[in-house]
Amino acid sequence: MLDIRLVKRLGATEIDCAFEARGPVTALFGPSGAGKTSVLSMIAGLIKPDSGHIRLDGDILFDAAARVDIAVHRRRIGYVFQDGRLLPHLSVASNLDYGRWMNGLGRNAERMNQVAELLGIGHLLKRRPGALSGGERQRVAIGRALLSEPRLLLLDEPLASLDAALKAEILPYLLRLKQQAGMPMVYVSHVASEVEMLADTVIRIENGRTLAPA
Amino acid sequence: MAYLSDQEWTAIALSLRIASVATLVALPFGVFVAWLLARTRFPGQSLLDGLAHLPLVLPPVVTGYILLLLFGRRGPIGMFLFDTFGVTLAFRWTGAALACGIMGFPLLVRAIRLSMESVDRRLEETASTLGASRFWVFLTVTLPLAMPGVVAGLLLCFAKALGEFGATITFVSNIPGETQTISSAIYSYTQTPGGDAGALRLTAISVIVALAALIGSEWLSRRAGRRVQGL
């Protein structure tokens, strides 16, 4: 379970959010510019909140009062960015393996095949990121995050940068991911239909503030 | 080859050896300083920046003289090196390599730093969410993506080291077989009656070596560039 209270001033906007996510899939839903991505970045540890706390399954990842701030690379939180962000100098296979290397996890061919099959990226392994379509890139990014064996997966509008046809291509993979991967997820989106399809809990965010559940 | 005298061959070999050693030894320091300047914030950073660039703006003779003061037999560092390790740098080829490395250092740091600054920070963040510590982010993301700049910096440093004259001759003099490089050999020829032919031969060699280095690094850097673009 994710338990969050975050306050952060970013330029002119102030983020002041509090919610509990019991998953499996929690959606952060709200208009563009509401501060959803900033909230994800704070959960991942990429932005430091001014005050508040982040607890995951009872572990404190951040607590301003207790001066706890676990480093990004120790949080074991997977992050799928809007724009994929594959490492351009590595092959698809190496991108997928990256989290395993960095976390010192043993080679697990079965898991690799399972994820590759789930996301339909088995035939791309030898390619380089520059030779992938937008949809393929995004699927590899999801696979890469999954294979780092995170405790929680953050997905930041993974469909936003794709056109309608590609969205339709990826949505089924996300549904399968939810059904088969069994990993708690926080899914950020401003599209109601995506959220309805995927989320068990919906947290609405507007102007940096969480609203009462609808 | 009969066209060149033994002494000229020695000068050429020595130049290449000095420039290679200078560049290779400067490389890890250059990468580290470039990373400090491009990716960290700390007090005294502009001082480090200034120090690293100093050899670029100081007259080379001044740099050579400072080296002589510091690393000469009676200089504080020179005395320490001799007493502890029995190492002498002044008037030795190793001293020439030190002088050349220091003269090339600003060019090395500058090229690497610029390309590190252009590495997308978001990719570094991504790597850290995948479990990479700062050190591993540097080693697996920043450095490989800055590789075109590293190659360019290596070439600039090597070229500078190969042609260095002022600091070298001040610090280690112009001793045939020990510290006489192509540049100082050419200088000696121009100071000797009838030395024109020798000076011209060595000049031609300089042009050939420089061109080869340029073409080689262009090729390397194009390869590195393709890789960085994910192709």
Image: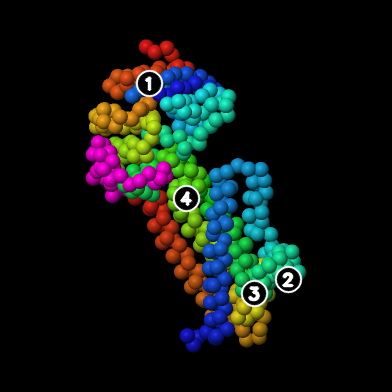
Q: Are marks 3 and 4 in contact (CB under 8 Å)?
A: no
Secondary structure found at label 3: loop
Inspect this view and state whether residue A131 appears.
Answer: no
Please name the amino acid that badge 3 sits on.
Answer: Arg
Q: In the image, which is nearer the foreground, mark 2 or mark 1?
A: 1
Residue under the point 51% across and 62% down:
B155
**What residue sits right under mark 1 in the picture?**
A22
Residue B139 disc label: 4
Residue under the point 59% across and 59% down:
B105
**What residue sits right under mark 2 in the picture?**
B73
Please name the amino acid that badge 1 sits on.
Answer: Arg
Q: In the image, which is nearer the foreground, mark 1 or mark 4?
A: 1
Mark 4 Cα shell of 10 Å, populated few (<14), some (14-19), many (≥20)? few
Q: Is residue B141 above or below residue A26?
A: below
**What residue sits right under mark 3 in the picture?**
B92
Residue A114 sits inside the magenta stretch = yes
Q: In the image, which is nearer the foreground, mark 3 or mark 4?
A: 4
| Chain bearing mark 2 | B
| Chain bearing mark 1 | A
Color style of the picture: rainbow
Please name the amino acid that badge 2 sits on.
Answer: Arg
Mark 2 Cα shell of 10 Å, populated few (<14), some (14-19), many (≥20)? some
Examine the image and state in which quarter residue B222 appears: bottom left
Please name the amino acid that badge 4 sits on.
Answer: Leu
Q: Are marks 2 and 1 in contact (CB under 8 Å)?
A: no
A93 sits left or right of B106 in the view: left
The residues tagged by marks 3 and 1 sit, at their Cα atoms, a distance apart of 71 Å
- Earlier sequence position, callout 2 versus callout 4: 2
Q: Which residues are magenta?
A: A101-130
Residue A135 sits inside the magenta stretch = no
